[in-house]
Image: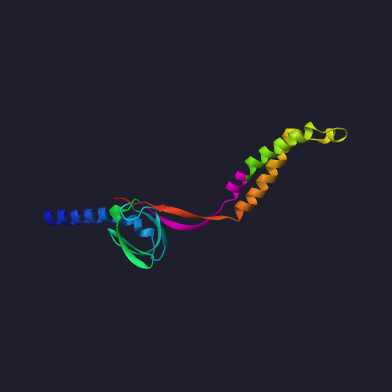
C-alpha cells in the first residue's frame, strides 16, 4: 500500500512540475502574432504567426512555411498586444527644441526693440514658454497620429 501511495505522489509531483514548467505558454493562442528572439535560428527578432506549441517546441508560420523551434533555443517570446499612440513622446520631442529656439528668438527680438515695442517684448522667458507650448502642441499632435506596436513578453520558465 505504501508503494502505491509513493508512486501516486511521485506521478502527481512530476505532473505538477511539468505543468508549471510549460504552463507559461498557455496564454499564447493559435494564429496569434508573436515576436521570437532565437539566436540559433535568426540573427534578429522575427515576427511570425503561431501555429501550435507543445511542451518543447513552437511551430510558427514564417515566410509561408511552417518552422519548428525548440523552446530551449528561444531567448524571448513576445505576443502582439495592439498599437499605442506616441502622444507624450511627441510632445516632449517637440517641446525641447522649440522652447530652446523660441527662447533664443525671443531674446534677440527684445535686444533690437525700440519705442513702443520694447514695452511689450517678453524676451527670453516669453520666447521659451511660447516656443515650448507651440512645439509641445505640434509634437503631441504628430505623436498622436503615429502608432507603434506594443509587445508583451511571455516568460519562459525552464
Give the camera-side residue of 146 and 106: 106
- Quarter occupied by the N terminus: bottom left
Q: In the image as oriented, which residue stretches furthest toward the front? A: 112
Spot occupied by residue 156 in the image (x, y as percentages of width and height): 33, 52
Spot occupied by residue 13 in the image (x, y as percentages of width and height): 22, 53
Give the camera-side residue of 135 and 28: 135
The residue depicted at 82 percent of the width and 33 percent of the height is 113
Give the camera-side residue of 29 and 99: 99
What's the colour scheme?
Answer: rainbow
Spot occupied by residue 34 in the image (x, y as percentages of width and height): 41, 59
* Picture layout, residue 116 above or below residue 40: above
Spot occupied by residue 56 in the image (x, y as percentages of width and height): 27, 58
Q: In the image as oriented, which residue stretches furthest toward the bottom? A: 64
The residue depicted at 33 percent of the width and 66 percent of the height is 66
106 in magenta: no
Based on the displayed image, in which of its 4 quarters is residue 49 positioned? bottom left
Q: Please indicate whether residue 56 sits to the left or right of residue 146 in the image.
A: left
Q: Please indicate whether residue 33 sits to the left or right of residue 16 in the image.
A: right
Which residues make up the magenta segment? 76-93
**Number of numbered discs present?**
0
The residue depicted at 26 percent of the width and 55 percent of the height is 18
Based on the displayed image, in which of its 4 quarters is residue 151 positioned? bottom left
78 in magenta: yes
Amino acid at each position: 500500500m505504501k508503494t502505491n501511495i509513493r508512486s501516486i505522489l511521485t506521478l502527481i509531483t512530476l505532473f505538477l512540475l511539468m505543468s508549471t514548467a510549460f504552463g507559461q505558454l498557455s496564454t499564447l493562442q493559435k494564429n496569434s502574432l508573436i515576436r521570437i528572439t532565437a539566436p540559433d535560428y535568426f540573427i534578429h527578432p522575427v515576427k511570425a504567426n503561431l501555429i501550435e506549441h507543445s511542451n518543447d517546441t513552437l511551430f510558427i508560420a514564417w515566410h509561408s512555411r511552417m518552422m519548428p523551434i525548440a523552446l530551449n533555443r528561444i531567448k524571448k517570446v513576445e505576443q502582439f498586444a495592439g498599437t499605442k499612440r506616441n502622444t507624450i513622446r511627441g510632445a516632449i520631442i517637440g517641446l525641447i527644441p522649440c522652447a530652446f529656439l523660441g527662447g533664443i528668438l525671443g531674446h534677440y527680438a527684445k535686444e533690437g526693440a525700440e519705442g513702443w515695442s520694447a514695452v511689450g517684448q517678453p524676451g527670453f522667458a516669453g520666447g521659451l514658454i511660447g516656443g515650448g507650448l507651440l512645439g509641445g502642441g505640434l509634437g503631441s499632435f504628430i505623436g498622436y497620429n503615429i502608432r507603434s506596436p506594443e509587445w508583451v513578453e511571455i516568460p519562459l520558465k525552464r
